[in-house]
Image: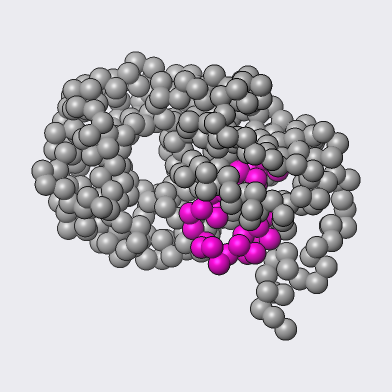
């Protein structure tokens, strides 16, 4: 018997609908590319629909992957049958590579299916996932400097202070050094952290994301400086995700909370990260790691290893709503959730009828059906550079 028979969703009769059917069939999948996002709309044959968002990296590839690789596994299926649909989208395209484009494209469809189901049942997604632990989550303001190419240290300080002025009590400086610029000389962190820390009020915490740009020895050296000179407690992605042993060396050498997992996309990749890297916090992104169906499994795996989840989240509309719905539904949520610079996303905010609510350092968990926010499709169609069904 072939090995695929033992995979979920591939046993005999897997093409059939579940014993209890919703009576709906997926009829149409449409993608919308705008400057800062790719949205997915899934429609059923009764007119019901749901919205999702894909990973924004290489949007034309995401669009193509959906329409030439994933859609055939979804059309005419019961939209409530999210687990079998996810398995077939993933395993039947697994040879394309388990990380990156595949789970990033799956995420848009998967989140839209959950949104559709929630709308149809009149329940927010967190209720579909077992109920809510919280109705708001502390947010940290996040911005990147592209290793010093985007803002001057003074401008970075002003931007950080703008978050504090909005009520954020935590700000993250994304250094965006990257693996192709490992251990830069001179290292911009020595100019930017002092400027940003000086610009922030004393009661606003600062932490730093290296974006995978250091070897272990340099990450340890810089981490000690950050801790001793600026009382920084959280240290994100100091080393490449391709070598978890270096991450473990940093974890074991520093009295800092290391966050990692932005570039892990499946439960299996997170298993390896936990076993070999052992960061204190994991930061999966719902629109990168396959949507709700997969990130829920990652959260359960994390719980088994006593790890908390801090959602990576760099898009402020559907992605943020999805991150909030998920984070509300798990017990092992971390101390905060990421929220990017709102001023960078005027177009995205302009195509929403309603969006997530931020107030006094917290993001409110939407409690309306599905994701809990609404897209203005007419405005989306006007703003889109590509629409494909």
- Whether residue 64 is visible, yes or no, is yes
Q: Nearer the viewer, residue 384 or 292?
A: 384
Q: Position of residue 268 (x, y in %)?
A: 51, 64
Q: Position of residue 137 (x, y in %)?
A: 50, 31
Q: Is residue 306 magenta?
A: no
Q: Nearer the viewer, residue 376 or 197?
A: 376
Range of the magenta residues?
85-114
Residue reaching furthest top? Answer: 165
Residue reaching furthest bottom? Answer: 1
Q: Position of residue 46 (x, y in %)?
A: 86, 36
Q: Nearer the viewer, residue 313 or 58?
A: 58
Q: Residue at x 29, y 22 (%)?
A: 159
- Whether residue 309 is visible, yes or no, is no
Residue 272 is drawn in which quadrant? Answer: bottom left
Residue 171 is drawn in which quadrant? Answer: top left
Q: Is residue 111 magenta?
A: yes
Image height of 232 relative to 74, above or below: above
Q: What secondary structure do most residues of the magenta stretch adopt?
A: helix
Q: Residue at x 71, y 36 (%)?
A: 50
Here the colouring is one colour
Q: Residue at x 39, y 17 (%)?
A: 166
Locate residue 365 relative to residue 186 in the image: left or right: right
Q: Residue at x 51, y 35 (%)?
A: 37
Tag count? 0
């Amino acid at each position: 018997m072939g090995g695929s028979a033992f995979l979920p969703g591939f046993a005999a009769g897997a093409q059939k609908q579940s014993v209890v059917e919703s009576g709906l069939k997926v009829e149409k999948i449409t993608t919308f590319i705008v400057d800062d996002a790719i949205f997915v709309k899934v429609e059923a044959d009764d007119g019901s629909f749901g919205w999702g968002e894909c990973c924004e990296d290489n949007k034309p590839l995401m669009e193509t992957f959906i329409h030439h690789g994933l859609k055939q596994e979804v059309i005419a299926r019961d939209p409530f049958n999210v687990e079998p649909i996810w398995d077939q989208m993933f395993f039947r395209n697994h040879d394309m590579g388990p990380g990156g484009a595949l789970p990033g494209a799956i995420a848009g469809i998967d989140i839209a299916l959950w949104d559709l189901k929630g709308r149809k049942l009149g329940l927010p997604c967190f209720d579909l996932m077992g109920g809510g632990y919280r109705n708001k989550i502390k947010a940290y303001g996040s911005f990147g400097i592209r290793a010093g190419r985007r803002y001057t240290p003074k401008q970075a300080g002003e931007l950080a202070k703008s978050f504090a002025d909005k009520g954020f009590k935590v700000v993250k400086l994304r250094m965006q050094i990257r693996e192709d610029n490992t251990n830069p000389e001179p290292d911009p962190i020595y100019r930017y952290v002092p400027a940003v820390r000086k610009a922030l009020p004393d009661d606003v915490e600062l932490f730093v994301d290296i974006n995978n740009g250091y070897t272990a020895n340099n990450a340890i050296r810089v981490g000690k400086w950050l801790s001793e000179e600026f009382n920084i407690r959280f240290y994100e992605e100091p080393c490449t995700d391709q070598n978890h042993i270096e991450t473990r060396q940093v974890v074991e050498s520093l009295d800092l909370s290391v966050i990692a997992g932005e570039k892990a996309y499946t439960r299996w990749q997170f298993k390896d990260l936990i076993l070999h890297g052992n960061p204190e916090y994991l930061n999966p992104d719902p629109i990168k790691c396959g949507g709700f169906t997969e990130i829920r499994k990652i959260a359960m795996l994390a719980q088994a290893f006593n790890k908390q989840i801090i959602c990576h989240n760099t898009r402020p509309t559907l992605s943020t709503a999805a991150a909030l719905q998920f984070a509300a539904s798990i017990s092992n949520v971390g101390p905060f959730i990421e929220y990017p610079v709102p001023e960078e996303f005027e177009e995205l905010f302009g195509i929403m009828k309603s969006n997530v609510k931020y107030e006094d350092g917290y993001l409110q968990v939407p409690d309306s059906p599905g994701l809990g926010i609404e897209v203005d499709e007419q405005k989306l169609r006007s703003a889109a550079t590509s629409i494909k069904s």
